[in-house]
Amino acid sequence: MDVDPDDVFRDEEDDPENDLYQERQSSKELVVFLVDASPKMFSITCPGEDEENTSHFHVAVSSVAQSIKVQIINRPYDEIAICFFNTKEKKNLQDLNGVYVFNVPEREQLDNLTARFIKEFDRVEESFSKVIGSEFGIVPGSRDNSLYNALWVAQALLRKGSAKTADKRILLLTNEDDPFGNIKGVTKLDMARTTLQRAKDAQDLGISIELLPLSSPNEEFNVSTFYADLIGLEGDELVQFMPLAGERFEDLNKQLRKRMFKKRRVRRIIFTVAGGLSIELNTYALIRPTVPGTITWLDSVTNLPLKAERSFICADTGSIIQEPPKRFQTYKNEDIKFTIEELSEIKKVSTGSLRLLGFKPLSCLKDYHNLKPSTFVFPSDEEVIGSTCIFIALHRSMIRLKRFAVAFFGSSSRPQLVALVAQEEVTYGGGQIEPPGMHMIYLPYSDDIRPIEELHSDTSGMMPLANDEQIEKATALVKRVDLRDFSVCQFSNPALQSHYAVVQALALDEDEMPEIHDETLPDEEGMSRPGIAKAMEEFKICVYGENYDEEEEKAGNAKGAKKRKTEEAAVSKAAYYDWSKLADDGKLKDLTVQELKSYLTANKLTVAGKKEVLITRILTHLGK
């Protein structure tokens, strides 16, 4: 039985005002993939992962397939639709030419991902030419506009849900930078204008359109020809986007995965400055631990999710209690009863807003004051107009004066002191590396800080110290094994990847497990390079000498550790007895051989011989 059915004493992670809870409950995403299926996508090839030439269509389909496999694990509640345009066959609710919405039975066209949908999409290339077919949807002498139709179908699919509760996106994959290149004159201008207007209508409804261009080895995708206007690129954004179009195709998976996991707002908070002046802030979780998804209990027969129900039964009558349970606290032999509302009010310490207390110099903020991953805050004028203006004034003043703000913040059950540290915008090559804003660092209370225990504060004659030569060799080794351009973003969690691979293989009935590359394993090939090998050998000789044998050392250490444990146990056992009194009373003979040996071992005496010999040895040591 659940002792806290109403979550009055819930953990912080389950608190609706907690950042992690807010992040889990943040708005879901509705995504439509628009994949170009024109003959040009099949005719142009590029080097694939195995260095063999592969078509753009294969690259696009395999990238989408990989993306949805990741998506069903990380964001299972998001809804996905996949549309092909420039197709012979048509399949869409609007009955528009050249657009085929891929789907499987018992699933809506825009819906949660299922194992069957992923399995069928994995095999779509095998029967594509026979079932769907490919043809140019924009040709001279015809008013058909497959790109316009595709945007129309995608917009219709994304009518589901509100833009306030769901992020709606269209991801367009194509290798044609000028879809109206074969059309001339007024017709071309008219078709381009109507297509751009259709895209603008979608964007006005809160739908973002993103382009994933596919370039050929000999010809770069020119986004300026048409798509810059369609997705709204200009100035620095256009300059920043151009290098992306020229990247190799094997990077498409990374691009798509990066875009699928866009930064999302965790929650909106009110920042009270002073005198009733408040501004609105959006918070973003930049770093959070990634863990496997929660376990869902299934019925063993139907394989459907189980719904848990809870009832309270009276211990005296055995009947189900209909009234809401009450809590009590015993005080002076009397049970004081509390309602759920009263307990919640007792627990409530803070309203959850952010309240400014003052400012301190940045030098006062120490590294060890960082209690948990910080939260990034950025102003918003959605509810409180003028928030951005006030935030910018505070931001610039804090940077100029080199100060940080101290504020009071927290959920109703865990209020905290926080430091707001202003961050300047960092740009490189026309692109933004770090955005302007503030980092909200969670500060510890005095109770949270623990003193450091210095186990070996006095090293005189106690521990060996490295000499100058050993330090010099160690320095040379460290320089040799330097990880240039190191970033934690280069390494995936091998335990998580293995878990996902098992889940994927079971869900899709795959015969073989996907191969997992553990990026945390040492680079044996790199470590065996002559320069590094020489530096390691010189360091080892300098510390251990030329005749050092690692295997013998390990064996010796194991024996030494076992001997130390035996001696420690003997000292502990021998301390139970008053050996001098036992010797005077003649009661040593009543002890067992093991007990006698514990005294001898504790005093580093030999333990060989029979019981009488051991007793004589103890009496001699005691001076009896």
Image (cartoon, rainbow, N blue to C red):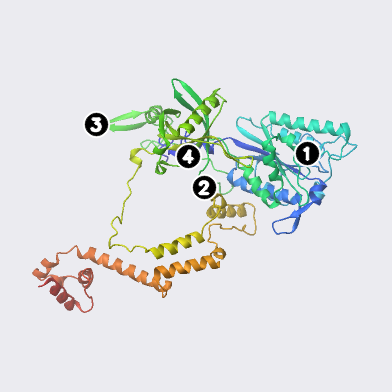
Closer mark to the observer between disc 3 and disc 1: 1
Q: Give x and y (percent) for residue 213.
A: 73, 44
Quarter of the image for residue 558 reads bottom left
Closer mark to the observer between disc 4 and disc 3: 4
The amino acid on which the numbered mark 2 sits, given as a three-letter code, is Val
The amino acid on which the numbered mark 3 sits, given as a three-letter code, is Lys
Label ID, residue 63: none
Q: Residue furthest top?
A: 275
Q: Could you tell me which residue is drawn at 81 percent across and 36 percent down?
A: 96
Q: Point out the tag, 3 or 1, that comes first from the N-terminus.
A: 1
Q: Is residue 512 visible?
A: yes
Q: Are marks 4 and 1 in contact (CB under 8 Å)?
A: no
Quarter of the image for residue 369 reads top left
Q: Could you tell me which residue is drawn at 28 percent across and 60 percent down?
A: 460
CA gap between label 4 and label 3 equals: 45 Å
Q: Secondary structure at mark 3?
A: loop
Label ID, residue 291: 2
Label ID, residue 374: 4
Tell me the residue that label 3 is attached to. Answer: 332
Q: Point out the tag, 2 or 3, that comes first from the N-terminus.
A: 2
Q: Give x and y (percent) for residue 200.
A: 73, 30
Label ID, residue 225: 1
CA gap between label 4 and label 2 equals: 19 Å
Q: Secondary structure at mark 2?
A: loop
